[in-house]
């Protein structure tokens, strides 16, 4: 205890510690680390940093080794793996005299390492027993109001597409002539079924996030395009209906005639992309 008190009250200056540090470097064959200086010279971290600064550029002399006991050379890669990164070095326990030395020597106070604050547990997330409570399950949002929105929208969209199809040349056809002559289909219903079904499916693929990047990008672009074409078709029908136009313009007729083919191509392409990602 007497030696410890003397060392704390009258700490050795850095210049007196440099020869000892050089001797340690010659013994090790390389510059010592801060923890090695603290253990060998029994000094604190601030003074060890100062000694290391004095050793900057010093080349230690290799220690004399006996040929019979010389270590086997190791590959640099193996040395790096065995040594590990310098940051993972476990700090050694500092001597008792280091704490008093830091206080007694104000000159080294600027070199003191900052003390990390002790982490405090969050009282809101940790219970009295020390265990973290489980997160409460999130309540699912109701989606049934969408059904109420779909009913009037379906009626308006269906009537608009059927009316536009009739103005563009769509109408009753006999798909099975000679087999079932009484079986008649009005082809104008293919417009609302195809266009609006594809729009809803493309929106589902886009917003669900379950498909791959290519499928989601294709679904996003095609969904916005299909919705825009659907809005343009509704506008065209209501304008022509309000003006009592007997038949659609040839350009409108050509565009409406291409809708079933376009819907078939878009749907097949999106289905292939989704299946490829899965």
Image (cartoon, rainbow, N blue to C red):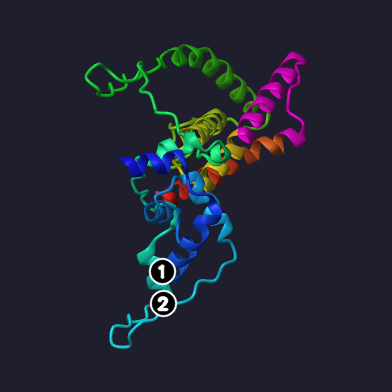
Magenta residues, dominant SS class? helix
Residue 94, horizontal then vertical, whole percent: 36, 44
Vertical side of 38 occupied by 174: above or below: above
Of the two numbered discs 1 and 2 on the same chain, state the one appearing first in sequence.
1
Residue 43, horizontal then vertical, whole percent: 43, 48
Vertical side of 212 occupied by 160: above or below: above
Other-residue count near label 1 (Cα within 10 Å), few / some / many at <14 / 14–19 / ≥20? some
Verify whether residue 24 appears in magenta.
Answer: no
Residue 270 appears in the rendering: no
Q: Residue furthest bottom?
A: 67
Residue 260, horizontal then vertical, whole percent: 57, 39
| The quadrant where residue 139 appears | top left
Compared across the picture, whether 40 is left or right of 161 comes to left
Q: Nearer the viewer, residue 172 or 112?
A: 112
Compared across the picture, whether 15 is left or right of 77 comes to right
Task: Please give the residue where the numbered disc 1 appears in the rendered image.
Answer: 28
Other-residue count near label 2 (Cα within 10 Å), few / some / many at <14 / 14–19 / ≥20? few
Question: What residue appears at the point 54 percent right and 32 percent down from the top-left corner?
Answer: 199
User: Which disc, if any, is residue 63?
Assistant: 2
> The N terminus appears in which quarter of the rendering?
top left
Compared across the picture, whether 249 is left or right of 184 comes to right
Residue 236, horizontal then vertical, whole percent: 72, 24
Question: What residue appears at the point 74 percent right and 22 percent down from the top-left corner?
Answer: 246
Question: What residue appears at the point 63 percent right and 27 percent down from the top-left corner?
Answer: 166
Bounds of the magenta span? 224-252
Question: What residue appears at the point 60 percent right and 66 percent down from the top-left corner?
Answer: 57
């Amino acid at each position: 205890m007497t030696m410890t008190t003397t060392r704390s009250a009258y700490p050795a200056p850095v210049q007196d510690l440099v020869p000892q540090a050089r001797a340690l470097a010659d013994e090790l064959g390389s510059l010592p680390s801060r923890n090695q200086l603290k253990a060998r010279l029994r000094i604190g971290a601030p003074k060890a940093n100062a000694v290391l600064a004095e050793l900057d550029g010093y080349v230690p002399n290799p220690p004399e080794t006996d040929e019979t006991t010389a270590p086997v050379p190791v590959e640099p890669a193996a040395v790096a793996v065995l040594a590990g990164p310098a940051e993972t070095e476990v700090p050694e326990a500092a001597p008792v005299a280091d704490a008093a030395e830091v206080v007694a020597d104000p000159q080294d106070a600027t070199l003191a390492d900052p003390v990390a604050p002790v982490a405090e547990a969050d009282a809101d997330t940790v219970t009295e027993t020390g265990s973290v409570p489980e997160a409460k399950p999130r309540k699912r949002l109701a989606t049934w109001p969408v059904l109420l929105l779909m009913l009037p929208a379906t009626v308006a969209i269906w009537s608009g597409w059927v009316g536009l199809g009739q103005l563009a040349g769509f109408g009753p056809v006999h798909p099975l002539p000679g087999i079932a002559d009484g079986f008649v289909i009005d082809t104008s219903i293919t417009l609302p079924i195809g266009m609006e079904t594809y729009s809803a499916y493309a929106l589902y693929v886009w917003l669900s996030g379950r498909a791959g990047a290519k499928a989601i990008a294709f679904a996003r672009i095609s969904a916005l395009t299909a919705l825009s074409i659907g809005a343009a078709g509704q506008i065209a029908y209501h304008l022509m209906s309000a003006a009592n136009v007997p038949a659609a313009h040839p350009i409108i007729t050509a565009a409406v005639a291409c809708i079933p083919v376009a819907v078939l191509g878009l749907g097949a392409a999106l289905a292939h992309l989704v299946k490829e990602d899965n």
